[in-house]
Amino acid sequence: MPLSPHFSDHDSRLSSRPLLILTPLEEEARCLMSGLLPVLKRHGLLIQRERVGSVFSPGLFRLQVIGMGPPDEDDDAFLSRLKPDDVVFLVGFGGGISSRAQRGDVFFLSSVSTFQEKDGEESRRFSEASLPGSSIMGRILGFPLGTGVSLLKIAGSPEEKKELFRLTGSDVCDMETGAWERVIQSKGCRFIVARVISDSVEETLPEFLGDLIQKNGKLSLRKLLLALLSPQKLLALVKIGYSQRVARKGLAELGRKIGVLLTEESKDKTMGEVFRGFFLGVLVMLFLGSFSVSAYAIPLPPPASSSGPPGTGPFLNPGNAESFPQLPIGVPSPFSFSTPTQNTVVIPLPAIGVSYNTGVTVGTIVPILSALPSGRITSILAPSITYNPYLGTQVGARYYRYYKGNLKRWHLIGLQSNSIWNFYEFHYRDLSMGDGRYILDIRLKDFKNPAARFYGLGPDSAFGNQSNYTLSEASAHVTVGANLDHQKIRAWFMERLREYGASPGVIPGLPYSGTVFPNVNGLSNNPVIISHRANVTYDTRDNHLIPSTGTYARAFAELDQNETAGEVSVFDRFNAEYKTWIPQGENDQNVLAIRGMVNLMNGPNIPFYAQSMLGGAYTLEGFGTGRFYDLDAALFNVEERIQAFDMTLLGVTSSWQIAPFLGVGEVFHDQRELTNPSLYAINPGVGFRALVEPNVVGRLDMGYSTQAGVVEYVGIGFPF
């Protein structure tokens, strides 16, 4: 059962039995389900109605309406089915009796006071019981903790509420928690209570309201009609209905968070497991980083960009743009500390790399990772300082913020060298809008890369014409779209503005690209391009970061306006991509991964920056980034990911793969050249991969081409 991995001091995980949710009123159940149901539907989970007042989702939860007040003989049937260590979650409205309990606030009760009865009446003496499971769950879901008091009747007037607060110091009053706590705890079950404030301490709740509710939690229509005949009661009911809109929204939001938590079983790990997983990922990357590589060996997610890292084009995509990496945290370091609501770890790491374009880079990066008690990361702050003989000293930081199980996130990156190189980016993405129906993506980016390479246009461009330039790019885009068919299908529209520039680079011995290729569009001016794109994707992968089966297909059509002074024109682009993963072996331990992609462009005055590009760690691995540019491109990749062995270190098991691969592709100016096999570049190679499920992949890939020889890449994530 996917709730808290540390529910109590003696438990490492919760019971595998479904969560039992109790609501006193049918209206409370309806409000809760209005937030919970869309989350479950988005994950393809079924909701079934068993009988009146009971709904359930197999293996996840059962919701039961219990009526107001303590349990009675009508509740014996489902209470008899409870087993020790079952988790029971009581949810409903409550009256605020402290000044901090305002209408619509959600409180998880850390304790409950119950007034003792004497001759059927409440005495002024009360007993108190603690609810440790409720305290932990409140922290996990991010709601404040409070204390409660249970009564035999509704406390309606401000005077009654203030007297209750004077006697008990509680925040919330209700009619169920105390009695149900005794029954649930006596069966060895764990009890969670959450109350949404329906009326604050200064508000009056009419005494007749309790008479309108039947024992089954439903509204009595006959008594309601009688109440409506009284102008005084009618006015009171209108006021209640209006004021409780905020409380109903609060209950729906609680339902949504419960739904997210119920569907996060594969994502949330204990803090210790997360610590160890990250540390193992660090060891993997440092091991791979001892080779001659072309990327920093640091375990941080690359900027998620549809156009790839600085200096790349539309065919270099660093991982799946639809994935949301949730990095594990390393083993507790001397710089770790915890609070009741957050765990923070600081892990200084070396940043070492050797790239094809810039040589050796050395430095340090210091990830500061914050997580909830469940282990789910909420933010990463990573300041860094590195040195490269060509790029100078690079100083800056990356900040990543995650929400809603990573369906919503944003990041901010600022990196600046003491020479030319820099990289700044803000990226916000939300796939959870409208209960997961809509998509919003906003990105602003500005960078300069003085190590960019250009070899000329066309498939027959000479390797010996390699030149260097500083690529400058400033861009902004806004994407809106919709999720369809449980997020298997996504359709969206994008508006993007890009401005490019070129100037002399910093690599000794290589001529400036603008001198070698003075007639290439883009090297002698500053192109400005406005793009309008319609995109649709189909995705059935079992895991976006470590897929072992499924299909991903994408197609888009784009209209581009070249607004460069003196070269105003319109051109178009059509792109289609298909990827599939086929499990193989007796136990499906190996995976055959296949990708095919084609990009077609038409129109005059297209700057080379906007044209199709092949070469680099995500397309043709036998070349450096930017090896081939032209209007159109075709690409085919296949690799067999063969499981070699498993290794357990620090309590975390990693799988190591050997992956022979083949990349075949070409760029071309005339679409008729697509069928000319002599123009295609062929890059065989082999990769070494280390996987820590569910979301860490370290790789060392060595591709080969007759022009560049062996080219090595290291990084996080699969090439496709």
Image (cartoon, helix red, strand yellow):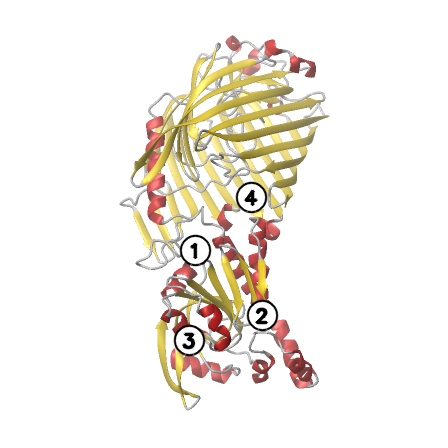
- The residue carrying mark 3 is 178
Q: Residues within 10 Å of mark 2 (few under 14, many from 20)?
A: many
Question: Label 1 vs label 3: CA separation?
Answer: 24 Å
Q: Secondary structure at mark 1?
A: loop
State the residue at coordinates (60%, 74%).
Answer: 218
Whether residues under marks 4 and 3 lie with C-beta atoms below 8 angstroms apart, the answer is no
Q: Earlier in the sequence, mark 4 or mark 3?
A: 3
Question: Label 2 vs label 1: CA separation?
Answer: 24 Å
Q: Earlier in the sequence, mark 2 or mark 1?
A: 1
- Closest to the observer, 74 or 251: 74
Residue 476 image-quadrant placement: top right
Whether residues under marks 2 and 4 lie with C-beta atoms below 8 angstroms apart, the answer is no
Q: Residues within 10 Å of mark 4 (few under 14, many from 20)?
A: many
State the residue at coordinates (38%, 63%).
Answer: 133
Viewer-side label of 2, 4: 2
Q: Amino acid at mark 1?
A: Leu
**Numbered mark located on residue 26 in the image:** 2
Q: Is residue 357 visible?
A: no
Q: Residues within 10 Å of mark 3 (few under 14, many from 20)?
A: many
Q: Amino acid at mark 3?
A: Gly
- The residue carrying mark 1 is 3
